[in-house]
Image (cartoon, rainbow, N blue to C red):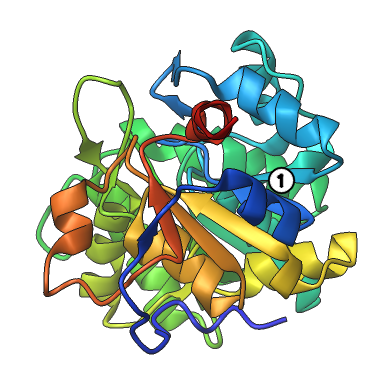
């Protein structure tokens, strides 16, 4: 499975079409992949009409999959968030970039005697643990400080064979230095990013600096490009297609970001639907400098219901 195509782009498509006939789109695919932040919820607030829309799609026999670049939670933890919001979603339908990082390491037979240094939160640690992969770092390094004295040299574990960087609210200079030492000094050490999202929705009030800022810091100091396993890399799409035995042409990717969600769908050969309930606005979509055009766009996923009702 290929996780190398984080920056691969497709040829610009024709201008996106406003969704007018949801039935035509629904009937043309068997699986819907939904991004979460900005599509299903914003922060901890459910977006209007989501439960009814998901129920309608399930009633039509559609497979639903939820893919998020947010690595702070494991699949199990995301399952609890869906449940708290009143959504009936199973763990098997959830794919977070924390899981993608562990799945990628398993797919390349990451050596059992090697460890992973984690710049990130609990979700990555839990997924590595479930995959039987040794790790260090994570939240416990959030309080660590470096006392710089003349001649001081920071030690690092020479058995670290991969550094995984994800969104980290406890990011600090210790983590940057430790990750950099592992990447630059441990022979063959991998540099893996869960995603490079510029912003994220920690609350529904504003946008917050995303995982891309942490990845950018480590990239800057290590002078190495990361291998990205989250969207828009093709790794997760290949993994999903293989796991569920889905033809990619029978998938519609639904998301609120052009450079991650829509590009993820296009790189995977899927149909794409942009919703304007999250990061991307209509002026951003219609900006002449924007080369990423989804097949369709609409305000929010509950338009599936309102447009159907209007058509009756």
- What percent of the width, then of the height, locates residue 140? 47, 33
- What percent of the width, then of the height, locates residue 166? 44, 51
Picture quadrant of residue 141? top left
Q: Quadrant of the C terminus?
A: top right
Residue at the image position 38 percent from the left and 23 percent from the top: 43
Q: Is residue 309 above or below residue 265?
A: above
Q: Is residue 285 above or below residue 99?
A: below
Residue projecting furthest to the front:
312
Q: Is residue 74 visible?
A: yes
Picture quadrant of residue 89? top right
Q: Quadrant of the N terminus?
A: bottom right
Q: Is residue 160 above or below residue 94?
A: below
User: Which is more toward the observer, 56 or 89?
Assistant: 56
- What percent of the width, then of the height, locates residue 14? 34, 79
Q: Is residue 229 visible?
A: no
Residue at the image position 53 percent from the left and 78 percent from the top: 267
Mark 1 sits on what residue?
Answer: 65
Residue at the image position 38 percent from the left and 89 percent from the top: 11
Q: Is residue 257 above or below residue 59?
A: below
User: Which is more toward the observer, 147 or 302?
Assistant: 302
User: Which is more toward the observer, 138 or 123?
Assistant: 123
How many other residues sit within 10 Å of disc 1, few (<14), some (14-19) or many (≥20)?
A: some
Residue 253 placement, left or right of 171: right
- What percent of the width, then of the height, locates residue 49? 52, 19
Residue at the image position 42 percent from the left and 75 percent from the top: 226
User: Which is more toward the observer, 186 or 35?
Assistant: 35
Q: How many marks overall?
A: 1
Element under disc 1 = strand
């Amino acid at each position: 499975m290929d996780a190398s195509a984080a920056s691969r782009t497709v040829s610009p498509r024709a201008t996106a079409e406003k969704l007018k006939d949801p039935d035509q789109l629904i009937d043309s695919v068997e699986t819907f992949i939904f991004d979460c932040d900005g599509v299903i919820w914003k922060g901890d607030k459910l977006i209007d009409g989501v439960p009814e829309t998901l129920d309608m799609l399930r009633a039509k026999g559609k497979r639903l999959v939820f893919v998020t670049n947010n690595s702070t939670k494991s699949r199990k933890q995301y399952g609890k968030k869906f449940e708290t919001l009143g959504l009936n979603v199973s763990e098997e339908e959830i794919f977070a970039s924390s899981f993608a990082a562990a799945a990628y390491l398993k797919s390349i037979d990451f050596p059992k005697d090697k460890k992973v240094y984690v710049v990130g939160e609990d979700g990555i640690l839990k997924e590595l643990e479930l995959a039987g992969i040794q790790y260090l770092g994570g939240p416990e390094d959030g309080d660590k400080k470096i006392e710089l004295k003349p001649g001081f040299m920071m030690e690092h574990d020479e058995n670290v064979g991969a550094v995984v960087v994800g969104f980290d609210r406890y990011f600090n200079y210790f983590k940057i230095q430790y990750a950099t030492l592992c990447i630059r000094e441990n022979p063959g050490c991998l540099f893996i990013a869960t995603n490079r999202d510029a912003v994220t929705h920690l609350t529904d009030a504003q946008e917050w600096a995303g995982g891309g800022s942490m990845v950018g810091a480590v990239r800057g100091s290590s002078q190495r490009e990361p291998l990205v396993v989250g969207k828009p890399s093709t790794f997760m799409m290949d993994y999903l297609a293989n796991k569920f035995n889905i033809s990619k042409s029978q998938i519609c990717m639904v998301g609120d970001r052009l450079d991650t969600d829509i590009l993820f769908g296009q790189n995977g050969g899927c149909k794409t639907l942009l919703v304007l309930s999250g990061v991307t606005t209509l002026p951003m979509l219609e900006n002449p400098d924007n080369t990423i055009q989804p097949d369709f766009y609409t305000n929010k996923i509950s338009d599936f219901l309102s447009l159907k009702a209007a058509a009756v």
